[in-house]
Image (cartoon, grey):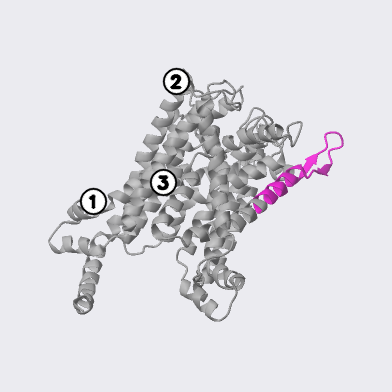
């Protein structure tokens, strides 16, 4: 005897297949790109056999070295500066009585998320051209670091602020109750509790800086090639699987940092 | 029980401390937001003001601007001055690129919604452990390098790419179908790029869905279709609006996708703007074009704010 089928009220017909299709569509092209980085043939499309030589030639490539170095200098500096600024701002905007201009300050922090990247790119380019023209100021690679810091701040800010808002205030009050100075209460209670939020924010800031193409391409001066720019330069030449190898490295860095940020945030949720 | 009797006192005590703590440190604490505000103010807001100013200047011959007031940039957006008789002629070239981009962005938003909603709903109805895996799987492409993901699409749809190779091998076609550097390629690239941007906000709104309402609808003899259209979709409206906005705005200003998949033949607004700062050497025109794009984005944001604030009042 067949059991009477119990209707699952949450089910909607066909939704499962669409979800699976979406996942396949999102992953198959990227997986193919990664697989071809191990192709021993020198064409990016025809499979000939397994090899690691393209990773080897990428690591021995001078241009790749300097692009990787520039990328790391820019994204590490931008991550550190933006995470510090975002942490301070999150404290200054949650652990206070609502002040006049708080809403406006919140909008300014989130501005880089609302303006399309291409507009930020040409605006930043115009800005640096102007200060170079009028004041003769050129910070070199510092231009890119400053531009990256601006759009990294809101990404670092979001998880830190979320963490501060979720935090149990009674511990901070208890510290104050036990005669901790505000600075001690912050250092011994608030900051340790805030660390997961800060790490999660820093991971996101690092990814967006590491991966940025649009703003970097327009603002970068000669000799300031980053990894995404290096890939772009390679696309315009006859391509070898070396480009797949470098792309795979970039993807793996993103996956690593997203997973780290994600796991930290999940642990908080539990 | 004990917590119930204790909490009012604890709360009022906490409130008292909070009041004191706030009094002593509020003024100092708010200064902590200054570094972030100064950096974004100087290197984020000021540049936007500069391009507003630039859009009213004259282009210098080798890029940059000459400090001379002019509204030519805005005129040139729609008109061109005839070299011979100095009359203004309506030239809709730029307008067409804007309309094309708008169309691309609208189609992208609609298809992403049609695919993303069922996906997000399916994710939200999984058991918690499975749900985490799904969210991670959608989050990874959300944060992955857009240039590399676009490159992956390019490899697949090239003349000698995987799709054409497979079709040729199967004998379905005898010469490759040209897909790269077409409108189709751009549309596909935009969908691929922004699908995760739709799924994640939809998911966070569907995750909070109160399924007792769904149950109540079934108790009142609603069909599955009615439950979907009259209960689930109206309740997830904030997520739908947020998702559409998160797809529409970046799709409208897309730069990387048309650059790589359109091959410089099929332009979108983003490439058009960048062109004025490169080979076009007309910065004021580029600034004006950027500001017109910004205006379109502000209109979209305005609708978003109006819709969501209305929601709060009714809800």
Marks 2, 3 in one chain: yes
Chain letter of mark 2 equals A
Chain letter of mark 3 equals A
Marks 2, 1 in one chain: yes
Quadrant (top left/top right/bottom left/bottom right) for the C terminus of chain A: bottom left
Q: CA distance from mark 2 to mark 1?
A: 42 Å
Q: Residues within 10 Å of mark 3 (few under 14, many from 20)?
A: many
Q: Residues within 10 Å of mark 2 (few under 14, many from 20)?
A: few
In this rendered view, identify the residue nearer to me: B278 or B48: B278
Q: Position of residue B97 (x, y in %)?
A: 72, 44
Q: Label 1 belongs to which residue?
A: A192
What's the residue at 12%, 62% (across, down)?
A178
Highlighted magenta segment, given as a residue range: B78-106
Task: Tell me the number on the disc at residue A56.
Answer: 2
Q: CA distance from mark 2 to mark 3?
A: 36 Å
B86 vs B33: above or below: above
Task: Tell me the number on the disc at residue A153.
Answer: 3
Q: Is residue B281 left or right of residue B242?
A: right
The mark closer to the camera, 3 or 1, is 1
Q: Earlier in the sequence, mark 3 or mark 1?
A: 3
């Amino acid at each position: 005897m067949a059991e009477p089928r119990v209707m699952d009220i949450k089910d909607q017909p066909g939704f499962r297949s669409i979800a699976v299709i979406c996942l396949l569509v999102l992953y198959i092209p990227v997986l193919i790109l990664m697989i071809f980085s191990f192709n021993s043939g020198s064409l990016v499309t025809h499979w000939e056999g397994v090899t690691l030589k393209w990773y080897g030639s990428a690591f021995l490539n001078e241009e790749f070295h300097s692009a990787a170095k520039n990328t790391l200098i820019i994204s590490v500096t931008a991550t550190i500066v933006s995470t510090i600024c975002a942490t301070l701002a999150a404290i200054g905007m949650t652990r206070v009585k609502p002040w006049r201009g708080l809403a406006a300050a919140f909008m300014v922090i989130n501005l880089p998320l609302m303006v399309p990247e291409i507009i930020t790119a040409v605006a930043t380019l115009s800005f640096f051209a102007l200060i170079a023209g009028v004041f003769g100021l050129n910070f070199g690679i510092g231009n890119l670091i400053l531009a990256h810091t601006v759009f990294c701040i809101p990404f670092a800010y979001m998880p830190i602020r979320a963490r501060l808002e979720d935090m149990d205030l009674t511990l901070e009050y208890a510290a104050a109750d036990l005669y901790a100075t505000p600075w001690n209460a912050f250092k011994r209670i608030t900051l340790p509790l805030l660390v997961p939020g800060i790490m999660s924010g820093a991971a996101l800031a690092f990814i967006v800086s590491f991966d940025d193409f649009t703003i970097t391409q327009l603002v970068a001066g000669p000799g300031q090639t980053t990894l995404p720019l290096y890939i772009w330069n390679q696309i315009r030449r006859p391509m070898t699987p070396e480009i797949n190898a470098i792309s795979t490295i970039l993807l793996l860095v993103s996956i690593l940092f997203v997973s780290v940020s994600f796991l930290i945030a999940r642990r908080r949720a539990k | 029980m004990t917590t119930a009797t204790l909490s009012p006192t604890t709360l009022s005590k906490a409130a008292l401390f909070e009041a004191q703590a706030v009094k002593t440190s509020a003024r100092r604490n708010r200064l902590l937001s200054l570094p972030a505000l100064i950096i974004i103010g100087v290197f984020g807001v000021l540049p936007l003001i500069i391009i507003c100013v630039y859009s009213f200047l004259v282009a210098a011959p080798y890029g940059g601007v000459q400090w001379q007031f002019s509204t030519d940039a805005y005129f040139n957006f729609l008109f061109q001055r005839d070299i011979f008789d100095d009359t203004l002629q309506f030239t809709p070239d730029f307008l067409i690129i804007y309309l094309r981009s708008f169309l691309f962005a609208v189609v992208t938003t609609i298809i992403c919604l049609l695919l993303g909603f069922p996906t997000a709903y399916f994710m939200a109805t999984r058991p918690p452990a499975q749900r985490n895996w799904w969210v991670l799987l959608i989050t990874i492409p959300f944060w992955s390098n857009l240039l590399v993901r676009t490159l992956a699409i390019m490899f697949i749809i090239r003349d000698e790419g995987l799709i054409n190779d497979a079709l040729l091998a199967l004998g379905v076609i005898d010469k490759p179908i040209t897909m790269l550097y077409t409108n189709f390629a751009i549309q596909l690239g935009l969908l691929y790029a922004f699908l995760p941007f739709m799924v994640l906000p939809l998911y966070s709104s569907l995750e909070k869905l109160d399924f007792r309402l769904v149950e109540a609808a079934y108790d009142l003899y609603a069909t599955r279709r009615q439950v979907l259209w009259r209960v689930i979709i109206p309740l997830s409206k904030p997520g739908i609006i947020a998702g559409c906005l998160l797809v529409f705005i970046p799709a409208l200003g897309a730069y990387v996708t048309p650059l790589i998949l359109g091959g410089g033949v099929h332009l979108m607004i983003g490439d058009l703007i960048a062109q004025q700062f490169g080979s076009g050497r007309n910065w004021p025109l580029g600034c004006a074009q950027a500001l017109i794009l910004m205006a379109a984005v502000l209109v979209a944001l305005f609708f978003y704010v109006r819709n969501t604030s209305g929601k709060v009042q009714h809800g």
